[in-house]
Amino acid sequence: MKIQFRKEEEYFTFHDPMQDGKLIDRKTEIRFDPLTGETARILFDPGAPFAPTDFSEEAAATTGKKCPFCPENVYDSTPRFPDELIEGGRLVHGEAVAFPNLFPYSKHNAVVRMSDQHYVKLDEFTVPLMKEAFITAHQYVEKVLEFDSKTTYASINWNYLPPSGGSIIHPHIHVLASEHPTNYQASSAAFSRQFQEREGVCYYSTLAAEEKRLGERWIGTKGSIDWIHAFAPVSHADFIGICDAASFKELTDTHYESLAESLTSFFAYFQQAGINSFNLGFFIPLSASEGERFHVRLIPRMTIGMLKTSDMNVFNYLHREPLSLKAPEHVAKAVQIHFA
């Protein structure tokens, strides 16, 4: 059995005014996630280009004294951790500064301010800059594990620019840790354990190997991370990075460097495709398991049309049904160029 890529096609028949009233059949494809069985819908849009928003004006209006993350404010305007968790109240690594989130999403929630620069465009992110931020996030999780033995789940999360839900333009990431998983962490852990018990192999490493063999959604390898496009994507693109590390203790600076190098390649694709916002999640098993791997998911975020409509709607939120305008196989081929 192992990995199964199942999809079903549906056709909607109507007279198309864009083709002089011709009667046409338009396809929607329903895909089933190989791990969970959850569905996603491929809509096959006619190829309308994405139009990125320029946030230079907003950046100019929110920089300096108006931004708590800018260099002149970061040590005065941000909260501090208790000394028993982190001596001195903050973690600093290069330009990265970690401090508590004023309005936490989780039992443990650090914000890592990534850079001194207020508005960092995609082509301005460097490997050292991102690597420093990820290492600082890792150090925070280390401190939490020493401090709170109940901690069993951790993630590093990045909302870049307003379309992603980011409320501050100054680049920053969130680090969450708790004994309570998010729905995604709980389901992916449970289903990957079931797969391991049923098939006798790790789901993630098997998925990477199978996608590489097929070549349809395979993107490439950067250092210790294999990259594929999800078969049943949760957005208009959905990139999955599968690392050779099975748990938090196996992660090294080299892994974070591979991740930063990967992101520069994706950012190059984003700029070519007219995308300038994204959500990124690193899902980190805290204890070693044969069935799990450290893995990453990266999805673009955008507004649509003249009204700057959100790319998320009732299907995504209330039906819990992801929609994608792009076929994963086409997107994967476009990204491969930047991994070559």
Image (cartoon, rainbow, N blue to C red):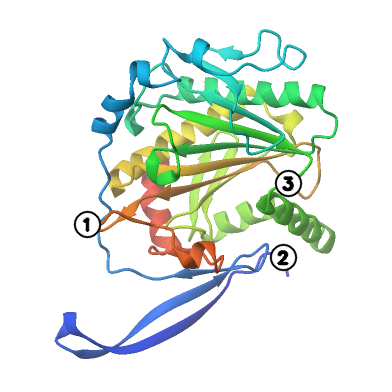
Q: Amino acid at mark 3?
A: Pro
Taking the view exactly as shown, the residue that stands out farthest to the left is 20
- Mark 2, residue position: 2
Residue 299 lies, in percent from the top left, at 47, 49
> Residue 283 appears in which quarter of the rendering?
top right
The disc at residue 119 is none
Residue nearest the viewer, comparing 186 with 189: 186
Which badge, 1 or 3, comes first in the chain's sequence? 3
The residue type indicated by label 1 comes to: Met
Q: Position of residue 291 (x, y in %)?
A: 78, 50
| Picture residue at 40% right of the left edge, 71% below the top | 43
Residue under label 1? 306
* Vertical side of 294 occupied by 18: above or below: below
Q: Earlier in the sequence, mark 2 or mark 3?
A: 2
Q: Is residue 95 visible?
A: no
Q: Identify the residue position indicated by label 3 in the image.
A: 181
Of circles 2 and 3, which is in front?
A: 3
Which of labels 1 and 2 is toward the front? 1
**Which SS class for mark 1?**
loop
Packing grade of label 2 (10 A; few <14, some 14-19, many >=20) is some
In the rendered image of this protein, does residue 28 appear above or below residue 268? below
Mark 1 and mark 2: Cα distance apart in space: 45 Å
Check if mark 1's residue and mark 3's residue have beta carbons within 8 Å.
Answer: no
280 sits to left or right of 110: left
Q: In the image, is 140 to the left or to the right of 298?
A: right
Q: Position of residue 272 (x, y in %)?
A: 28, 45
